[in-house]
Image (cartoon, rainbow, N blue to C red):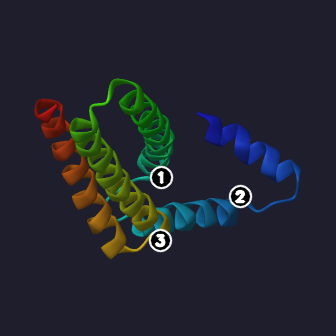
C-alpha cells in the first residue's frame, strides 16, 4: 500500500523507481544472507539481557560478600560466587561471539545460550 506513495515521492524527486525498487530488493537479499541463526532483533535482545545480567552479577557478588562478612557463612558464599562468575563468563563468551558476527560465532553463541539457560536453571536447585 505504501509502495505507491513511496514511488510517487521518488518520481517527484527525480529518482528512477524501478532502479530504487531493485536496489531495495538486493539490500533485503543481502540482509537475508547475512543472517545465520539469530536475527538482528534477537542479537539486540541477547546483548541487552547479557549486559543486564553482568550488571546484576556484579551487584549480587558485592551483596553476597558483604552479607557473608556479617553472617560468617563463608562456605556457601564461595559456592555462590563461583556460580556467578562461571555464568558471567559464559555470558561474556556468548556476547563476544554474537558481536563477531560469523557463522561459527553464532553457533558458539547458540550453544552458550543453551548451556547458560540449563546451568542457571540447575543452579536454582543447588542453593
The residue sitting at 41% across, 25% down in the picture is 70
Q: Secondary structure at mark 2?
A: helix
Q: Residues within 10 Å of mark 2 (few under 14, many from 20)?
A: some
What residue does disc 1 label? 40
Lower position in the chain sequence, tag 3 or tag 2: 2
* x, y percent for residue 79: 23, 44
Q: Secondary structure at mark 3?
A: helix
What residue does disc 3 label? 100
Position of residue 66 in the picture relative to residue 117 (left or right): right
In the displayed structure, 17 sits above or below 8; it is below
How far apart are the alpha carbons under marks 2 and 1?
28 Å
How far apart are the alpha carbons under marks 3 and 2?
36 Å
Q: Secondary structure at mark 1?
A: helix
Quadrant holding the C terminus: top left
In the displayed structure, 80 sits above or below 18; it is above
What residue does disc 2 label? 17
Amino acid at each position: 500500500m505504501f509502495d505507491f506513495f513511496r514511488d510517487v515521492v521518488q518520481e517527484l524527486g527525480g529518482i528512477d523507481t524501478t532502479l530504487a525498487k531493485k536496489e531495495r530488493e538486493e539490500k533485503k537479499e543481502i540482509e537475508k544472507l547475512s543472517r545465520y541463526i539469530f536475527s538482528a532483533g534477537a542479537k539486540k535482545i541477547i546483548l541487552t539481557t547479557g549486559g543486564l545480567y553482568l550488571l546484576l552479577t556484579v551487584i549480587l557478588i558485592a551483596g553476597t560478600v558483604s552479607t557473608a562478612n556479617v553472617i560468617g557463612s563463608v562456605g556457601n558464599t564461595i559456592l555462590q560466587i563461583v556460580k556467578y562468575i562461571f555464568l558471567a563468563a559464559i555470558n561474556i563468551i556468548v556476547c563476544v561471539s554474537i558481536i563477531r558476527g560469523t557463522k561459527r560465532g553464532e553457533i558458539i553463541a547458540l550453544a552458550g545460550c543453551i548451556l547458560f539457560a540449563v546451568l542457571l536453571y540447575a543452579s536454582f536447585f543447588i542453593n
